[in-house]
Image (tube, rainbow, N blue to C red):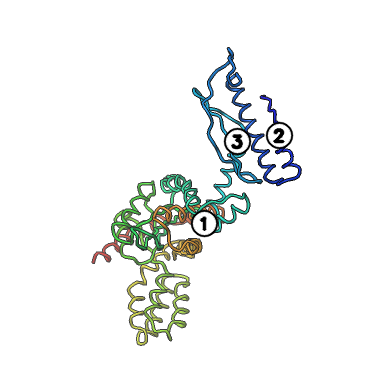
Amino acid sequence: MAQVNITLNHEELVALLGGNREEAFKHLVEKILNEALLAESTAQLGAEKYERSDNRTDQRNGTRERELTTKIGTIILEVPRHRLSPFHTTLFETYQRSETALLNTMAEMVIMGVSTRKVSNVIEMICGKEYSKSTISEVCKRLDPEIKEFQNHDLSVHDYPFIMVDATYFKVRENHRVVSKALFIAVGLTTDGKKEVLYFKVYDGETNDTWLDFFSHLKANGLKDPLMLTSDAHKSIRYAAFKVFPNTAWQRCQFHFTKNILDAAPNSQRPGLEMELRQMFLAKNLTEARKKRDGILSDYSDVAPKAMELLDNGFEDAMTVFMLPENTWRHLRTSNTIERLNRELKRRSDVIQIFPNEASLLRLMGSVLIDQNDIMLMKRTSFGRKAYESISTETRIKLKTLACEQQKLMAA
């Protein structure tokens, strides 16, 4: 190991003992570290400065400055440079590990919904060094490879017989204007009832082409034809889903369906109608649900005709789930799993309000979704494998037949 000798002059010693001790101590640490770097350089070269030696392996080539943030402040190091091979030092290894941990923490704070301004203030209090908002934004770009890897992860490893999709909107700056961007999300349920985020992507809006692109990515990533898809009644979702997965039956989200019906009803009728709709959806079988529907139509046709027309036209699509085992209904009849994800995304995005660009939207909201996916994987399964295995061949055929019928009705 190279020997380090430190020499203090009279002024340095006086300052250390009686003057501005903080500045003097910082100067002392800086001097010690620079001497350590020179000693390491000498050991690697095999010769002192200007020394002629047969053991010399390289030549000095000046120094470069490097800032090192410590608890006593930022110090400036003179890092040696060699002509033929790079100078190596163990001095920065611990610092680099700490710096990496700090940068990861900064990115995690942003993902968790802390504003970049607050992140900067916290880091400055801890480290005594200020990080600008733009620097923190640059740090967050370290998340991009993980986002890309997740978007392309292999979906053929597991079967996802049930999927649900939805889109939620965020404000983004684009070409000096604030525009609305849609984040599409797909969640799948495995054969044993585990929920997973399958894919997400940002689009300008919900169109036939964008949803077609989204479903095509799912298929390209290895997703096999699901038995059933749950979503709201957006026409582009249904169009694209039937194009890419023609054998997949559609379950209209009962939560969105209820909201559509109530929005079309007079305010005075909504509380009672909502209660009756809930009872209809909680029926023990399809026959009972149809009886309750008929009762609702009879009771409300005069006072809420538009709402009753929506109920009558959309009822069957909202009851596809009744073809499956009863213990799966609660988990498959709505897309509330994605609604909960959307609320988590909005909670984080409320801090940002307007994303500086589309890449930052995908980066931060994608990171939140990856974190939420990890949480979902740790939770109990929605239903057991036995429930899935109890789905008979006859039921699977009926679901495919229903998918064909739904496509014909949509095309009509």
Which of the 4 image quarters holds residue 37?
top right
Q: Amino acid at mark 1?
A: Thr
Quadrant location, the N terminus: top right
Q: Secondary structure at mark 3?
A: helix
Q: Which mark is residue 72?
A: none
How far across and down, in percent of the image, does residue 377 sit?
A: 53, 52
Q: Position of residue 83 (x, y in %)?
A: 49, 24
Q: Determine which residue is flagged by label 3.
A: 93
Q: Residues within 10 Å of mark 3 (few under 14, many from 20)?
A: few
Q: Earlier in the sequence, mark 1 or mark 3?
A: 3
- Mark 1 residue element: helix
Amino acid carrying label 3: it is Glu
Dot in front, 2 or 3: 2
Vertical placement of residue 393 versus 222, above or below:
below
Mark on residue 116? Answer: 1
Distance Cα–Cα, label 1 vs label 2 = 44 Å
- Label 2: how many residues lie within 10 Å, few (<14), some (14-19) or many (20+)? few
* 24 displayed left or right of 74: right
Q: Nearer the viewer, residue 192 or 49?
A: 49
- Give the mark nearest the N terminus, 1 or 2: 2
Q: What residue is pinned by disc 2?
A: 9
Amino acid type assigned to the residue bearing label 2 in the image = Asn
How far apart are labels 1 and 3 at the CA level? 28 Å
Question: Which dot, 1 or 2, sits closer to the camera?
Answer: 2
